[in-house]
Amino acid sequence: MSPQLLFSFVLSYFALLLIVAWRTSRNSNNESFFIGNKNSNWVLVAFGMVGTSLSGVTFVSVPGTVGASGFQYYQVVIGYFLGYVAIMFVLLPLYYKLNLTSIYNYLQQRFGRVSYRTGAIFFIISRTLGATARMFLVVNILQLFILDKMGVSFWVTAAVILLLILLYTVEGGVKTIVYTDTLQTSFMLLGLVVCISAILGQMNLGFGEAVQKLGEADLTRVFNFDVNATSFFLKQVLGGAFITIAMTGLDQEMMQKNISVKTLTDSRKNMFTLATVLLVVNFLFLVMGGLLHLYAQEKGLDLKGDDLFPGIALGGYLSPIIGVVFIIGLISALFPSADGALTALTSSFCIDLLDIKNRNDWSEEEKKKRRWTVHISFAVLFFICVMVFKWIDDKSIIDVILKLAGYTYGPLLGLFSFGIFTRRKVKDAMVLWICLASPLLILSLDFINNAEWFTGKMGLTGSLAEGLKTLSQNTFHGFKLGIEILILNGMLTFAGLWMISQKEEV
């Protein structure tokens, strides 16, 4: 199928999103943008959040991991489920009790204004890096398989996609995204099912036979009991749980949609539905990854990692229709994470840093203009970050995202944990410094632990490189830090807050 024809399907998809945005954003205001007037349907929110939680990374990177590690990623998915349960019974009741628009306002009520601003700043950093890493993955695939063949530069592709996202989010915000995310999740899951069916057809296998064949190829192994490995099951399950608590429960983008639901009961229904659906959908992505790996071996294709799925879907090995389904599924996986992130970042900046809701000296029209300015500014920042990821061009974006989450969400985990599980009062002015020191100390540990990788990336050789490798071996004795960095970072932040706190007077 020609790149021009594939591109026409992409444009048609954008046109559909713009029509939905136009219809849903009519008569919208600032409250519509920030929390959907607290009138969102929990079923739509739950279904749309499936797409936001999965993103293009799950669509491409998760299938690509199966060849090297089997179904071990499912250890993390089990952890995700446990994390959603914790959000349901610990964080959601807190947010509804305080009637929050920004979840970081809790930190102001508990500790003070510096803590509040610190939480918002770490969210802005975290979500910007995570969303743009996900966006880069999808934009890069569109570029390699469609736009390069049409002579379009990467920066033009990234800029145009961000402009289109701006067009359908700048007015309606959350009110619009609840509907566009539902539409996009539908397309993404349809793409997943169609692609699995197509591969099964090519290999003349039923679903049960396929799973059996994957097992015979040792691709369905889930649990890793090697304590020193980064994929040791306890690390992965605990890491997955805390990643969900941090990247969903302490993330304004995810909670912004959740608290737009009227009642706590409906919000919990939303969260449980999301958690259950993700167990099934991630399993299907892993099955598809195994099938793609077997298909690549059968055809003698040298495809692995993030190149596996797009290489087969768009490389002419399956029917042209599958190429279209893949592209639509891919961009459907991209936009729930990109549009939601852009909206949530705008909301957090306006509410948490500009204090827009309490500025009585600004008219509604003035507030709207400032919101537009912030929204456009974040789109520009997204573009810059995507170009940086293009320069780095890592082959496994899911590893990059989980690593970044450990550094940027760790302080948020420590802050909220300290606030919820202690009654101590901190020295508010020192909170920012504790939250900066913690990830820097963890980075130092990670540098020593992964000295060989870092020295290779930095081009270090000679006695310095050998000395760092020896230090790593003598310090960690083969133990490798993985996604538990998030937990360590949170614990270190918690300990630092304890040191600058005192018992609250009764």
Image: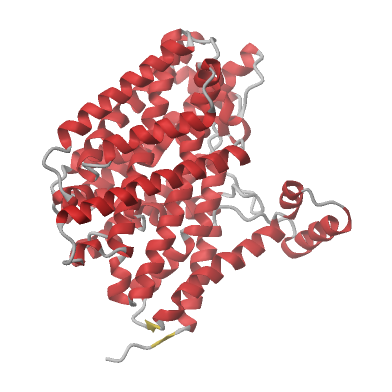
Residue farthest to the right, as pictured: 463
Q: Position of residue 292 (x, y in %)?
A: 54, 21
Whether 39 is drawn above or below 202: the answer is below
Residue beneath the point at 42% across and 21% down: 327
Q: The C terminus appears in which quarter of the rendering?
A: bottom left
Residue beneath the point at 84% across and 51% down: 461
Q: Nearer the viewer, residue 94 or 436?
A: 436
Residue beneath the point at 51% across and 45% down: 385
Q: Is residue 281 left or right of residue 462?
A: left
Residue beneath the point at 52% across and 25% down: 143
Whether 308 is drawn above or below 386: the answer is above
Q: Is residue 303 left or right of residue 317?
A: right
Q: Quadrant of residue 311?
A: top right
Q: Position of residue 9 (x, y in %)?
A: 36, 16
Q: Nearer the viewer, residue 238 or 175?
A: 175
Tell me if residue 277 can be seen.
no
Q: Nearer the viewer, residue 196 or 216?
A: 196
Q: Quadrant of residue 101?
A: bottom left
Tell me if residue 418 can be seen.
yes
Q: Position of residue 203 (x, y in %)?
A: 52, 11
Q: Position of residue 135 (x, y in %)?
A: 46, 37
* Display coloring: secondary structure
